Amino acid sequence: MESDRWVWQDHYDHPTAWEQSYAPLSLPDMLKAGAEADGARPLADFYGRKYSYAECYDAARRFACGLIDLGIKPGDRVGLYLPNVPHYIAAYYGSMMAGAIAVNFSPLYTVEELTHQAEDSGTRLLVTMSAHPLFDNAAAVLETSCIERLIVGTVAEALPVAKGLLYRLFKRSSDARIPDDPRILRYAHVVANDGARTLPAIDPERDLALLQYTGGTTGRPKGAMLTHQNLTANARQVNQIDPHSELPDRILGALPFFHVFANTAVLNRTVANRGEIVMLPRFDSRQVLAAIKRTRATSLPGVPTMFQALLDCPDLPRADLSSLRVCISGGAPLPLPLKAKFESIVGARLVEGYGLTESSGVVSVNPYEAPGKTGSIGQPFPATRVILLDREDPTRRAPPGEPGEMAISGPQIMRGYWNNPQADAEVFINGYLRTGDVGTIDDDGYMRVVDRIKDMIAVGGFKVFPSQVEEVLYRNPAVREALVIGIPDDYRGECPKAFVTLWPDKAEDWTGLTLKDWLNPQLGKHERVCAVEVRESLPKTLVGKLSRKELVAEERAKAGLAQG
């Protein structure tokens, strides 16, 4: 399946050579290099409190020593059930310094979701915060799962002194009361050591750094096994394609670190580049605009709904965003009208990229400065190979000129799924990772995602790609958001149905019926929707991506069908 020469090599628009090799590097050594090179340089800004590289490295070492004192051994799993707070940096790198494998848990997980992931991963210890409902959920899981201990931090201890005092005075109700339980330890006590222990050696290419669980769009989430080399290579790839990497680097970190996109494109790539992260515990458009103005942030990674929220924010006309050089959109297709509007109003370039949990975060992106190709997911990262497989028989290449399932090989690709050899056998073929995404690659190496294989709608023997129908819907100036799914149809098996939200100033002019009448003449016969449903909002994932699976579940329930 190898190619002697890849089509993008002769047309590579990123500011680096595509052919690269990456020396073995662990995540703790990456942080250590920053601390030794310029320890006083700020790594994180948390509401105005600066954390230097030396301070973060020291906190990570002390956290590692605290874990070892608690009996954590190399290969043990340490869970991070945290928002974007400084504790995350220490716990993430510190767990790895102790030889442990970090496991990210979403702060929005329910007790049931926490329990499943803890049991599946065999997590021994969970790091969280005292805020409701994080602590309440973590304490519940402590009673019912394999988790043996909790380490609990507070927001107040991470804030600037004055803000910390105010937090303690006025925000007590937002924190849980930490019970007197030997299984529950305060973060401050765990790091109260000199950090002078001898730490375990790490083999970057063999040792796992992170279990990153998939979104669970089909069945239970699976734990992608990511090595130190997977993650540090991807961080270096991100920086290599950035033409501004030698300039002062201050990235706005509102994407949640527990998600693989932020883990690589915000946290690890910043440490690799010795930049600074302006940390926000969650995305709030007003706070993001204020933080960009206060810190003169230079870049902002996000998902499309975040950029739309910034455009919708009433504070935008008064915001100063002139410091932004580039914004990177990932996690979901970037609607072309949104890209055009954002760039015209904000003045910063908004480029689209693509990645997977299984690829440590990022596979491709449009160039930051070269023209790129609107609507594409860009060219592959350095040392990243992408082929198209036949949709019906993945052991063969897709016929020339036809879309195929994208399959990827590169230094950032996971080792496999945790304790799931059957899933490994299904997802790997001849050394390539099957993505489940149907795409195309043009003569310049620019890729486009047509749709997800599992999202394709079977209409009387024809395959309909929901994203292609959604693309037409976005051409209507009244449509703000759009999702298309297949619903059961007695005659054709499935029929496409569209769900939309409308811009407030256009809502009175359009109904579901008039949108259907506008849409269907622009589609092929088998693509035509049976209905357009106008809603106040559409379902979204934890990181703000539009999500079809809730709509599919609703429609199957209406039809009296079980979830497939």
Image (cartoon, helix red, strand yellow):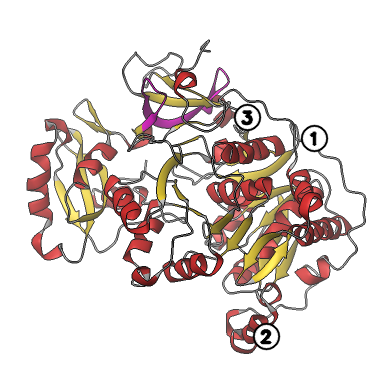
**Between discs 2 and 1, the one toward the N terminus:** 2
Residue at the extreme top: 4
Tell me if mark 1 has few (under 14), some (14-19) or many (20+) residues whose alpha carbon lies within 10 angstroms of its own: some
Label the magenta part by its dominant secondary structure: strand
Left or right of 262? Residue 187 is: right
Tell me if mark 2 has few (under 14), some (14-19) or many (20+) residues whose alpha carbon lies within 10 angstroms of its own: some
In whole angstroms, how far apart are the C-alphas of marks 3 and 1? 15 Å
Cβ–Cβ below 8 Å for labels 3 and 2? no
In whole angstroms, how far apart are the C-alphas of marks 3 and 2? 46 Å
Provide the residue designation for mark 3: 411
Q: Which amino acid is tagged 1?
A: Asp
Q: Nearer the viewer, residue 240 or 404?
A: 240
Cβ–Cβ below 8 Å for labels 3 and 1? no
Tell me if mark 3 has few (under 14), some (14-19) or many (20+) residues whose alpha carbon lies within 10 angstroms of its own: many
User: Can I make out residue 302 in this image?
Assistant: yes
Residue 378 higher or lower than 311, as above or below: above
Disc 1 secondary structure class: loop
- What residue do we see at 71% from left, 64% from top? 51
